[in-house]
Image (spheres, rainbow, N blue to C red):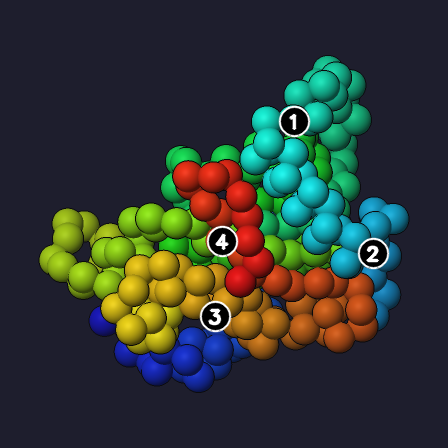
Amino acid sequence: MPDHARVHPNFGRRQFLQNTLSGAVVGVAAQAGIGLASPQKLQAQTTLSPDAALQELLAGNQRFASNQLTSIEHDLTILKEHTVDKQEPFAAVLACADSRVPVELVFDQTIGHIFVTRVAGNFVTPEIIASLEYAVTVLGIRALLVLGHTSCGAVKAAMKADAVPGQISALYQHLQPAVEQSGGHVDKAIEANARFQADLLRTSSTVIREAAKAGKLKVDAGVYDLATGKVSLS
């Protein structure tokens, strides 16, 4: 097992992420052929404030939950043409890979509106942060939401810690801090995990931390209810 897999789930993960992030995000930018601006020079590509960007996500979710979608009215041909050479998302979401959580639909958004990263259990890795730092520094997003969801299979599996095939158990260590805070309750573990991962984003990435400190970015956590379709901040 690599040394980083044995570190303490709280401080150790933060330290590991901090030590590996700079190389990861530079690699992402290099592959995209883009130079990275400093957080202090960040120019948002959206006119929304951080608070307004988060509220736009929540307003879209209210439309979704009440079956009053507006995103389906957009002309997809025009949207595709507009986004061929550039993207201007106003928010980013770190979501679970679960097929029951279609992020753009949940927030009643369409092509080019949300920068989405996904992994089972919606947890932070160097690659996830590198992608989100790109969204902050290059794309100028104003809100970043970590989105858990009810009945999360990854969290349930981490709580049971049963033997599983392949590399599925590699998820467990990332979710363990939330499991330890849950008192054995799945719903509490899901909420705690979303909050914990949002906190990791704020503390492990200097780019995200400085953008938030400067009032250019709002980082929050929420949980999507599979039954009602509603997102609640946690």
Decide: marks 1, 4 in contact (CB < 8 A)? Answer: no
Which of the two labelled residues, at mark 3 and mark 2, occupies the earlier sequence position? 2
Which of the two labelled residues, at mark 2 and mark 1, occupies the earlier sequence position? 2
Q: Residues within 10 Å of mark 4 (few under 14, many from 20)?
A: many
Q: CA distance from mark 1 to mark 4?
A: 20 Å
Residue type pointed to by label 2: Ser
Which of the two labelled residues, at mark 4 and mark 2, occupies the earlier sequence position? 2
Q: Pointer 2: what residue?
A: 49
Q: Is residue 207 left or right of residue 192?
A: right
Numbered mark located on residue 69 in the image? 1
Numbered mark located on residue 223 in the image? 4
In-front residue for pair 165/214: 214
Question: For the residues carrying marks 2 and 1, which lies nearer the camera in this image?
Answer: 1
Q: Is residue 194 left or right of residue 30?
A: left
Which of the two labelled residues, at mark 1 and mark 4, occupies the earlier sequence position? 1
Q: Is residue 22 left or right of residue 98?
A: right
Which of the two labelled residues, at mark 3 and mark 4, occupies the earlier sequence position? 3
Q: Position of residue 160 (x, y in %)?
A: 18, 61
Which of the two labelled residues, at mark 1 and mark 3, occupies the earlier sequence position? 1
Numbered mark located on residue 196 in the image? 3
Q: CA distance from mark 2 to mark 1?
A: 23 Å
In this view, 55 is above or below 190: above
| Residue drawn at (70%, 53%) of the image | 54
